[in-house]
């Protein structure tokens, strides 16, 4: 939290200086909002997100290879809201989401996410079903993060 506050304060100062420098062209920009958005966006690109996620997964796999009791918990989801609520509950109960992941089951995607209706097996879903579900889950998790960060900023 302290790091987030430091980033927010430095971003706020930067935006305030830019607003003073550029005058009317930045007139409608609210420095508090811009600084908050900057502080919330830890990753600048999708590649940064992928690198961060891959590093966590590699670490978890290495821990499991060294000791099979260090397994990860996979929690199935077929909708963004289900993923969001699952991770909120995990965080509330365990105080962390470490070693707990959302799992996309092939049969769930085939049965519940097909635009053509339920399909008989996991190999029969259209190629857009999984990416659209991942995008939906990502958006729901971003929404939950925004709500949590909003609460932190209000405290």
Image (cartoon, rainbow, N blue to C red):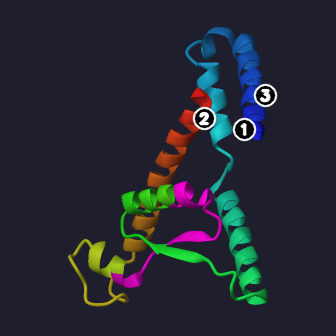
Residue 154 is at least partly visible in this image: yes
Q: CA distance from mark 1 to mark 3?
A: 10 Å
Quadrant of the rendering where the C terminus is positioned = top right
Q: Vertical placement of 95 versus 118: above or below?
A: above
Asked if residue 117 is among those painted magenta in the image, a careful observer would answer no
- Residue count near mark 3 (Cα–Cα under 10 Å), binned few <14, some 14–19, many ≥20: few
**Chain-order first, disc 2 or disc 1:** 1
The numbered dot on residue 10 is: 3
Q: Is residue 48 left or right of residue 126?
A: right
The answer to whether marks 2 and 1 mark residues whose Cβ atoms lie closer than 8 Å is yes
The answer to whether marks 3 and 2 mark residues whose Cβ atoms lie closer than 8 Å is no
Q: CA distance from mark 2 to mark 1?
A: 10 Å
User: Of discs 1 and 3, which sits in the foreground?
Assistant: 1
Q: Residue at x 55, y 34 (%)?
A: 151
Q: Residue at x 58, y 19 (%)?
A: 29
Q: Residue at x 66, y 36 (%)?
A: 38
**Total labels drawn:** 3
Question: In the rendered image, which quarter is residue 83 located in?
Answer: bottom left
**Chain-order first, disc 3 or disc 2:** 3
Residue 130 percent location from the top left of the image: 42, 72
The numbered dot on residue 92 is: none
Q: Which secondary structure, mark 2? A: helix
Residue 131 percent location from the top left of the image: 45, 68
**Chain-order first, disc 1 or disc 3:** 1
Q: Which secondary structure, mark 1? A: helix
Badge 2 is on which residue? Answer: 152
Badge 1 is on which residue? Answer: 4
Q: CA distance from mark 3 to mark 2?
A: 17 Å
Q: Residue at x 69, y 81 (%)?
A: 70
Quadrant of the rendering where the N terminus is positioned = top right
Which residues make up the magenta segment? 90-107
């Amino acid at each position: 939290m302290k790091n987030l506050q430091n980033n927010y304060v430095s971003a706020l100062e930067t935006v305030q200086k830019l607003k003073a420098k550029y005058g009317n062209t930045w007139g409608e920009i609210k420095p508090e909002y811009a600084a908050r958005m900057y502080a919330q966006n830890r990753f600048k690109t999708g590649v940064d997100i992928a690198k961060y996620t891959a590093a966590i997964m590699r670490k978890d796999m290495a821990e499991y290879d060294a000791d099979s009791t260090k397994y990860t918990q996979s929690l199935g989801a077929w909708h963004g809201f289900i993923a969001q609520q699952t991770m909120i509950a995990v965080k509330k109960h365990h105080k962390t989401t470490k070693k707990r992941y959302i799992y996309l089951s092939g049969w769930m995607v085939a049965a519940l996410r097909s635009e053509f209706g339920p399909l008989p097996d996991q190999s029969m879903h259209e190629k857009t079903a999984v990416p659209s579900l991942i995008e939906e889950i990502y958006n729901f998790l971003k929404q939950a993060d925004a709500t949590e960060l909003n609460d932190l900023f209000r405290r």
